[in-house]
């Protein structure tokens, strides 16, 4: 387990990290998200020893993270960290050797990972001759080739096509199944939502939210959705251009209510509330209720809301504090 405790880092007048803390459990995939400049890359560089923190501590399984432990970390920086004129296989073997892997095992791992990541045919090519997407695959192979105990990946899905995203996602899930935890940053929130066991939202160097996607959704007011086939009265009012007042009256007492009429003629209603029954009553007053249930808010919406208000309170689930 990786423990990050009270990290602080300042660059001149900029407080890049401000008492930042987080945990990473064995076999856990954690998405690390935030606006540009929030402190994600700074945190990762401190973990890797590229930057020194002004304060705080890092421990791995109870021991300080030192140079020896960092040899067991697979790191993928956001910027290209490859030698452009070096051949792919030669480079991966070299990087594995730097992590202490013997030559035969390094060569074997090099071939295994380029095949696993779909670039076996480029094993003997120079990196500079690869597309940006294939260079990104080589970057991930470089993080994996030493069979690390921990993965720290900065924007690993940047510039990849959907097929490559799926391949990389499968690899991270497989590594998690073997007990290897992963911390990765990404602006592709749909990938984060689909892949991660937990999400950390960082803002101005501090934890804004930390939990599973379902836990983050639960932190907001529940929202409900209903689909209605309008009854004869509603259809008649609709034909006369009088539907808006009818629906508005039905939803009048419901908090944050909204509605739309779709191309198939159905009414889609939604509102906030502790339960769905007020919306159900409003919906049945307008016609035949076809669907009723909670709205599953996408992570992108949660992310925007968490960063929208500068006075928004920092939140972290109690079970992780």
Image (cartoon, helix red, strand yellow):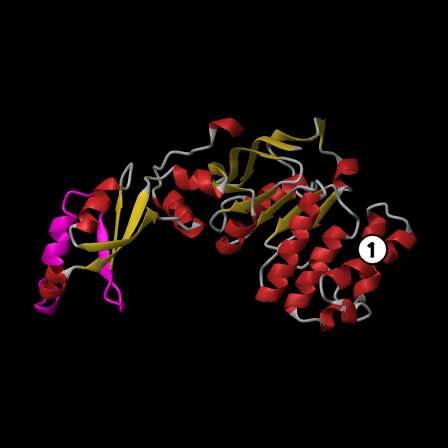
User: Which residue has dot 1 on it?
Assistant: 109
Tell me the residue at 82%/46% (across/down).
99
Q: Quadrant of residue 52?
A: top right
Q: At 41% from the left edge and 42% from the top edge, which residue is drawn? A: 217
Relative to 262, 296 lies left or right: right
Looking at the picture, tell me which residue is in the foreground, 141 or 216: 216
Q: Give the magenta part as a residue range.
A: 238-266
**Which residue is at a point 64% across and 68% down the rendered structure image?**
132
Residue drawn at x 34%, y 37% is 311
Q: Quadrant of the N terminus?
A: top right
Where in the figure is residue 20, as x and y percent of width and height? 53, 34
Among all residues in the image, which is located at the extreme bottom? 129
Left or right, 67 with reference to 21:
right
Q: Quadrant of residue 281?
A: top left
Residue 176 horizontal side relative to residue 158, left or right: right
Exactly how many numbered labels are in the figure?
1
Name the foreground residue: 303 vs 70: 303
Percent position (x, y) of residue 178? 72, 43
Question: Whole-percent x and y of residue 86?
Answer: 80, 65
Query: How many residues crowd around disc 1 within 10 Å: few (fewer than 14), some, or many (20 or more)?
Result: many
Magenta-drawn stretch contains 259: yes
Is residue 19 on the magenta stretch? no
**As drawn, is 87 to the left or to the right of 73?**
right
Residue 270, position as x, y percentages in the image: 26, 50
Residue 229 seen = yes
User: Residue 65, relative to residue 288: is it above or below?
Assistant: above
Instruction: Identify the image quadrant of residue 170.
Output: bottom right
Note whether residue 13 is visible.
no
> Under tag 1, what secondary structure?
helix
């Amino acid at each position: 387990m990786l423990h990050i405790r009270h990290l602080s880092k300042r660059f001149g007048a900029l407080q890049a990290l401000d008492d930042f803390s987080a945990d990473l459990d064995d076999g856990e995939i954690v998405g690390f998200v935030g606006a540009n400049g929030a402190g994600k890359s700074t945190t990762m560089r401190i973990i890797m020893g590229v930057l020194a923190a002004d304060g705080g501590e890092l421990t791995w399984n109870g021991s300080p993270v030192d140079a020896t432990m960092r040899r067991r970390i697979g790191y993928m920086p956001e910027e290209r960290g490859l030698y452009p004129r070096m051949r792919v296989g030669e480079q991966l073997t070299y990087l594995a050797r730097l992590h202490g892997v013997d030559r035969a095992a390094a060569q074997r791992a090099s071939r295994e990972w380029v095949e696993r990541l779909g670039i076996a045919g480029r094993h003997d090519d120079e990196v500079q001759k690869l597309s940006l997407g294939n260079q990104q695959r080589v970057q991930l192979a470089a993080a994996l080739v030493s069979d690390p105990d921990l993965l720290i990946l900065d924007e690993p899905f940047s510039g990849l096509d959907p097929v490559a995203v799926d391949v990389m996602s499968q690899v991270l899930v497989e590594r998690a199944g073997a007990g290897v935890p992963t911390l990765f940053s990404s602006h592709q929130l749909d990938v984060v939502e689909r892949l991660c066991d937990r999400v950390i939202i960082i803002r101005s160097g501090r934890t804004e939210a930390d939990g599973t996607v379902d836990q983050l959704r639960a932190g907001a007011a529940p929202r409900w959705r209903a689909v209605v086939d309008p009854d004869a009265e509603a259809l008649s009012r609709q034909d006369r251009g009088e539907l808006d007042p009818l629906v508005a009256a039905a939803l009048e007492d419901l908090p944050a209510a909204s509605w739309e009429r779709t191309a198939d003629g159905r009414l889609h209603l939604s509102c906030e509330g502790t339960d769905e029954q007020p919306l159900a009553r409003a919906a049945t007053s307008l016609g035949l209720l076809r669907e009723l249930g909670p709205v599953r808010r996408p992570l992108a919406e949660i992310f925007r809301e968490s960063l929208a208000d500068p006075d928004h309170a920092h939140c972290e689930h109690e079970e992780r504090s």
